[in-house]
Image (cartoon, rainbow, N blue to C red):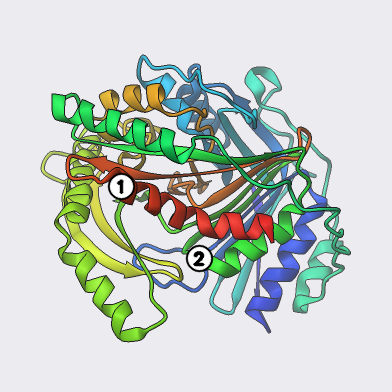
Amino acid sequence: MRTNTTYILKDFKLFKNQLLQWSQQFREVVFLDGNDYHRKYTSFDAVLAVDAFTSIETDYVNAFAKLDEYQQVTKDWLFGYLSYDLKNDTEKLSSDNHDGLHFPDLFFFQPKKVFLIKGDTIELQFLNICEEESPLTPEGGLKPQGECDDNLLWKIFAGNEFETLTPQPTTRNPQLIQQRISHESYLDKANQMLAYIQRGDIYEANFCMEFYAEDAVIDPLQTYQKLNAISNPPFAAYFKNNKQYLLCASPERYLRKEGNKIISQPIKGTARRSSNAVEDESIKQELLTNEKERSENIMIVDLVRNDLSRTAAKGSVVVEELCGAYTFKQVHHLISTVSSQLKEGFTATDALKTTFPMGSMTGAPKISAMEIIEKLEETKRGLYSGALGYFTPEGDFDFNVVIRSILYNAAERYVSFSVGSAITAKADPEKEYEECLLKAKAMRSVLEQ
C-alpha cells in the first residue's frame, strides 16, 4: 500500500531541477521528463522514482517470464529497462559483439518514493513499508531493500523547500570520442546491407555504430542536463543503478498501455532543421513527401501492425496516424501511431514480449534483420535501442525507445553512445553516414565540450 499526498507547485522548472538534484543520494533513480510536449497519450509532465524496496536484475534467459512474475506479484509501480539483447529471449538469436558497458539485460525496481508531476500539481506516493513486509523473497533476483521512511520528507517537500546536495565538480571530460566503425568501413557494411536487400533477405534494417571513450570520468547529472537542454525531447530520461547510468534524450515512444489499449509510435524518417524559418518549413514539407523516408516509415508500420496483432482482439489493430511530420529542436521526424486492443488472456508483459525489440530499431522481416545486424555491427547494443519506462499499479505501462542517449559505467570508466539509420533499397550509404553523424552531434558536443 502507498500513502498519497498532493501539493501545488510554485515553480515547475525550479522544482524539477531541485527534485532531480535531491534524488542523487539514492542508489536507484529514474527521472522521466516530457519537456512540455503536450501530445496525445500523455499521463504526466514528469515522473521521479527513487530508492528500491525490491528489484529484479537478470540476463536474457527467461527474462520476460521473470518480469511478468515480478509485475504480477508486486502490483505496484515498477521502473526500469529492457535491453535490446532480450531479443535472445524471444527468438533463437545471440549477442556476441563487443560490450564495454556490461549492464544487466533487464533491470526493474519497486520504488519507495514516486513523484508524479502534472501541470502545477505534484502527487507524492510513499510505500508504507513500516506497517508491511515485502511479499517478495530474495529468490530469483528479487531483493527487499531499505528500512522505514520517516515523516521528515513530507515537511521537506511541502512548499518546494529542499535540502539539495552540493553538485560535485566534473573532474575532467572524457578523452576524445572514438568511432567504433570508420567512415570507410561504414560504407562497406552499408553496401553489404544493400546486397542482402537486393537478394531479398530483408526489405529494411536499422544499422548502428558506436562512439565511445575509455578511462572516462563525467558528471552524469550535469551531462544529462546539458543533453536535455540541447534536445528537449518528449521522452527524456535520467536513469541510475548504482554506478550505471543512462542519460537519454529520446524523441520516440516504444509502447504504451492504457487499460486494454496498446499504442506504438514508431519514428522513421529524419531531416535536418534550419535557422531560417522559411527554409525550415520547406525542409519539413519535403520530408513529408520524400519517397525514401516515407517508405522507411510505412515498412515499419506494417511490422508494428503485425507485432500488435499477436496479442490483439480481432480487427482491433488501427493505424491512427501515418507519417505525421513532427518538429524537434534539432531535427524533423516522421511519426506514425498504431494501436490495438489487448485480447483477453494476455498480460501487459505479453504485449511487450511480442513486440520487442521495436521495429523502428530492427527492420523487416524482423528476425532476418536482427541476424544481419548482428553480423555487420561491431558492438553489442545493450540498453541502446532497448526501452526505459514504468508499470503502474493497475498494470498499465509506458516505455520510450533508448536512442539519442549516453550510457556510462562509472565503475569501468566507460562512456558510450550509438546512432543508426534505416538502410532500404533506395539508401545512399554516404547519406546514411551523414544522417548518423547528424544524430550523433548532440551527444558528441556534450561529451567533448
| Percent coordinates x, y for residue 426 in the rendering | 18, 45
Which residue is under mark 2?
Answer: 34
State the quadrant of the C terminus: bottom right
| Percent coordinates x, y for residue 312 in the rendering | 21, 38
| Percent coordinates x, y for residue 316 in the rendering | 15, 46
Residue furthest toward the left? 315
| Camera-nearest residue between 219 and 337 | 219
> Relative to residue 104, is residue 168 drawn left or right?
right
Question: Can I make out residue 404 in this image?
Answer: yes
Residue at 30% over, 39% down: 359
Question: Can I make out residue 200 in this image?
Answer: no
| Percent coordinates x, y for residue 203 in the rendering | 18, 34
Sequence order check, earlier mark of 1 and 2: 2
Residue furthest toward the top? 92
> Relative to residue 392, is residue 273 drawn left or right?
left
Look at the picture and state if 288 lies above or below 315: below
Residue at 72% over, 52% down: 220
**Image mark for residue 260:** 1
**How would you rate the neighbour count of disc 1 (Cα within 10 Å): few for under 14, some for 14-19, many for 20 or more?**
some
User: How far apart are the two marked residues, 1 and 2, measured between alpha carbons?
Assistant: 23 Å
| SS at badge 2 | loop
Q: Are marks 1 and 2 in contact (CB under 8 Å)?
A: no
- The total number of labels drawn is 2
The type of residue carrying mark 1 is Asn
Look at the picture and state if 81 lies above or below 49: above
Residue at 58% over, 79% down: 120
| Camera-nearest residue between 298 and 64 | 298
Residue at 69% over, 35% down: 54
| SS at badge 1 | loop
Look at the picture and state if 14 lies above or below 323: below
Discs 1/2, front: 2
